[in-house]
Image (cartoon, rainbow, N blue to C red):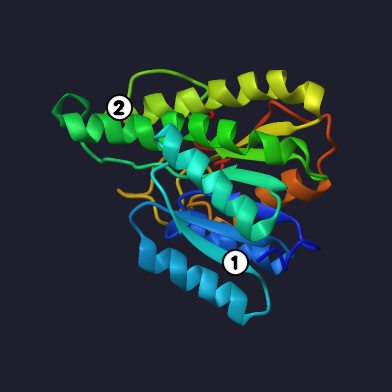
Amino acid sequence: MNQNREYPAVLITGAGTGLGRALALGLAKDGFAVAVHYRHSRAGAESAAAEICEAGGFARAYGADLAAQAGAEDLARRIQEDFGKLDALVNNAGSYQETPGLNLTEQQWFEGLNSTATQTFFTSRAMLPMLRSSQLRRMINIGDSSCDRPGARDLAWSYHIGKTGVWMLTRSLAAEEAKHGLAVNLVSPGFLENSVGPLPRDLPTGHPCTFDDVLTAVRFLLRDAPPSLSGSNLMVGGGWNLR
């Protein structure tokens, strides 16, 4: 296809629903050609891609299991064929299981780890050749407002462990890829507009963060941040988890 080479291309994982879908639509409005990844939410991803195209942009929806090396490498090949390049990667996917830690099933345990740290690792590694050769050279991982403060958790242990792994991967990749001019940063949302459970009483702003709040942070790191800004963790949590 390759008809969109004049536009910067971005891959957003887990973009069929929620935050990922909002990032896909928002970055398309900014002029990005968007690879909309999904694992389960095919209808949402395809409708997001269709909405982008109807508005005059360029997007394709791709189903892939990125927790497997073969799935990530196959997706990289498809993006190369359809887009001809990849300028930026947003590792957004993550499966949150609202289950007490010791009650997690085997499937839930691995889903929490694989949808976060494992998927971020294989996807990042598969996309690196295209990212290194691009003009923009940006990778943004989506963390969690407590991922850089390991401690006791009541629910979704494997998800939180996985997000802490994403934080460590961000710093490791930032150090490894500096020689290639690739900036790798983390955006860590707090309680979002689609988060489960009651609004935390200790949230200083008194209201959840919006998808637009996170989009603004991602947009800054993609467009306005200097190349030397790498390995950072940009908190978008409304003050949650500061204490």
Q: Please name the residue shown 36% across and 60% down the image.
A: 41
Q: Which residue is mark 2?
A: 157
Q: Position of residue 46 (x, y in %)?
A: 45, 69
Of callouts 1 and 2, which one flags the residue occurring earlier in the amino acid sequence?
1
Residue extending furthest toward the bottom: 54
* Amino acid type shown at disc 2: Trp
**Label 1, on which residue?**
59
Closer to the camera in the image, 133 or 47: 133
Is residue 145 visible to us here?
no
Left or right of residue 129, residue 209 in this image:
left
Is residue 10 visible in the rendered image? The answer is yes
Mark in the foreground, 1 or 2 = 1
Q: Is residue 113 above or below residue 188?
A: above
**Residue drawn at the location 72% of the way across and 24% of the way down:** 177
Distance, label 1 to label 2, CA atoms, is 34 Å
Amino acid type, residue under disc 1 in the picture = Ala
Label 2: how many residues lie within 10 Å, few (<14), some (14-19) or many (20+)? many
Q: Is residue 24 above or below residue 132?
A: below
State the image coordinates of residue 138 (x, y, percent, origin top left).
Answer: 72, 40
Helix, strand or loop status at disc 2: helix
Q: Give the percent coordinates (x, y) of residue 231.
A: 69, 25
Quarter of the picture containing the N terminus is bottom right
Position of residue 3 measured from the top left corner of the image (x, y, whole percent): 72, 68
Neighbor class of circle 1 (other Cα within 10 Å; few <14, some 14-19, many 20+) is many
